[in-house]
Image: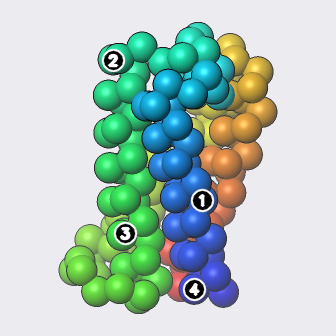
């Protein structure tokens, strides 16, 4: 179950990275991100999308490390990191849940729920 949860979380983070890449490229899907105020993201928010992609990669490393699928980090970092990620995604549930953007709320809230649950599954392993 741990391997499945870690792989599912990693695939979902990869999909989010591709979504952020599309936002950076100017695809008009901004209503699903960053508060949904812009169809096409302005430069400042595109920088935020670049940072998000880097963070998703770090998140994936922590998740895979905690699931013992890779060995790049000390165990303590992965153990603490997975619970920090769970808290981060739990906060994402709240923040996306109160978004004024209905498309963002409807898409990103469930994504954060799934990621939080997957982090719990990996963390409890």
Image quarter of the N terminus: bottom right
In this view, the mark in front (3 or 1): 1
Q: Residues within 10 Å of mark 2 (few under 14, many from 20)?
A: few
Q: Earlier in the sequence, mark 1 or mark 4?
A: 4
Q: Which mark is residue 46?
A: none
Q: Residues within 10 Å of mark 1 (few under 14, many from 20)?
A: some
Can you say whether 97 is above or below 38 in the image? below
Q: Residues within 10 Å of mark 4 (few under 14, many from 20)?
A: some
Label 1: element kind:
helix
Can you say whether 106 is above or below 34 in the image? below
The residue carrying mark 3 is 62
Q: CA distance from mark 4 to mark 3?
A: 13 Å
Side of 93 where 42 appears, left or right: left
Q: Which mark is residue 12?
A: 1
In percent of width and height, residue 123 lies at 50, 74
Q: Residue at x 77, y 33 (%)?
A: 106
Q: CA distance from mark 2 to mark 3?
A: 27 Å
Q: Residues within 10 Å of mark 3 (few under 14, many from 20)?
A: many
Q: Quadrant of residue 19?
A: top right
Can you say whether 62 is above or below 54 in the image? below
Q: Earlier in the sequence, mark 1 or mark 2?
A: 1
Q: CA distance from mark 1 to mark 2?
A: 25 Å
Q: Which mark is residue 44?
A: 2
Q: Earlier in the sequence, mark 4 or mark 3?
A: 4
Can the viewer see residue 33? yes
């Amino acid at each position: 179950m741990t391997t499945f949860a870690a792989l599912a979380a990693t695939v979902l983070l990869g999909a989010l990275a591709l979504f952020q890449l599309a936002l950076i490229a100017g695809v008009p899907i901004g209503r699903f991100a960053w508060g949904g105020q812009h169809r096409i993201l302005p430069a400042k928010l595109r920088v935020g999308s670049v940072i998000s992609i880097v963070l998703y990669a770090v998140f994936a490393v922590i998740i895979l490390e905690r699931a013992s699928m890779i060995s790049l980090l000390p165990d303590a970092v992965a153990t603490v990191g997975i619970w920090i990620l769970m808290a981060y995604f739990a906060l994402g549930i709240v923040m996306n849940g109160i978004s004024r953007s209905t498309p963002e709320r409807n898409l990103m809230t469930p994504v954060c729920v799934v990621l939080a649950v997957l982090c719990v599954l990996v963390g409890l392993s």
